[in-house]
Image (tube, rainbow, N blue to C red):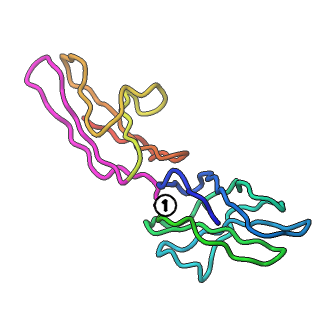
């Protein structure tokens, strides 16, 4: 039985822990393999994403393929080799998505003051920066309010989900 997969939003290329519980006896050399369905949840042509040689319950350290297509109905199941058995899937849809900024809005101010900006992303966490690369995030979330500024300034934004980050950062002026 395949356990709960967390988080439910996974980036292509990211690692995912696949817990499973076995029932019955397995012979020495048995291989448990985690399989990824297609985006509709079908295992007609599954993708093997990780394996573990074991006779016992455990966790398979798997990786979502780098080129995996975005989708919201993926499932993961575990199969065994000795005996050859197919386990149930994880029981809940998984979203595989690479974060993309979908919109940005730059606010304005007449004279010195703060400026509120906003951005939206397909998935993940939005980070705000004062430079196009490097540096620490100034804040996270769909809106960002600058400190008191007296001249035009450019801020930058990206979206991060797991090990994936939209690139390059998008300028918000």
Q: Quadrant of residue 149?
A: top left
The number of numbered badges drawn on the structure is 1
Looking at the image, is 72 positioned above or below residue 147?
Answer: below
Q: Is residue 12 left or right of residue 34?
A: left
Write the residue at 48% across / 45% down: 165
Q: Of helix, strand and loop, which one carries label 1? A: strand
Write the residue at 59% across / 52% down: 14
From the viewer's side, name the closer residue of 8 and 171. Answer: 8
Q: Residue furthest right?
A: 28
**x and y, in percent, of residue 72 in the image:** 43, 66
From the viewer's side, name the closer residue of 68 and 107. Answer: 68
Q: Is residue 148 left or right of residue 111?
A: right
**x and y, in percent, of residue 36 in the image:** 60, 68
**x and y, in percent, of residue 155 in the image:** 31, 31
Q: Which residues are magenta?
A: 94-122
**Residue 47: within the magenta?**
no
Q: Is residue 4 left or right of residue 129?
A: right
State which quarter of the image contains the C terminus. top left
Q: Quadrant of residue 3?
A: bottom right
Q: Quadrant of residue 80?
A: bottom right
**x and y, in percent, of residue 148 in the image:** 21, 16
**Residue 112: within the magenta?**
yes
Task: Report which residue position mark 1 lands on.
Answer: 96
Q: Estimate how packed mark 1 is, as few (under 14), some (14 to 19) or many (20 or more) residues with alpha carbons within 10 Å.
A: many
Q: Residue furthest front?
A: 24
Write the residue at 51% across / 50% down: 7
């Amino acid at each position: 039985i395949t356990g709960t997969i967390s988080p439910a939003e996974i980036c292509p290329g990211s690692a995912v822990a696949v817990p499973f519980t076995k029932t019955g006896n397995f012979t020495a050399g048995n291989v448990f393999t985690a399989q990824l369905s297609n985006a509709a949840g079908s295992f007609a042509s599954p993708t093997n994403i990780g394996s573990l040689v074991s006779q016992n319950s455990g966790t398979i350290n798997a990786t979502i393929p780098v080129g995996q297509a975005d989708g919201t109905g993926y499932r993961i199941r575990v199969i065994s080799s000795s005996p050859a058995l197919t386990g149930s899937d994880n029981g809940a849809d998984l979203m595989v998505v690479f974060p993309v900024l979908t919109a940005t809005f730059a606010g304005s101010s007449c004279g010195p003051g703060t400026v509120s900006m906003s951005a939206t992303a397909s998935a993940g966490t939005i980070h705000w920066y004062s430079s196009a690369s490097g540096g620490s995030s100034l804040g996270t979330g769909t809106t960002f309010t600058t400190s008191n500024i007296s001249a035009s300034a450019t801020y930058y934004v990206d979206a991060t989900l797991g090990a994936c980050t939209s690139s390059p950062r998008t300028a918000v002026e």
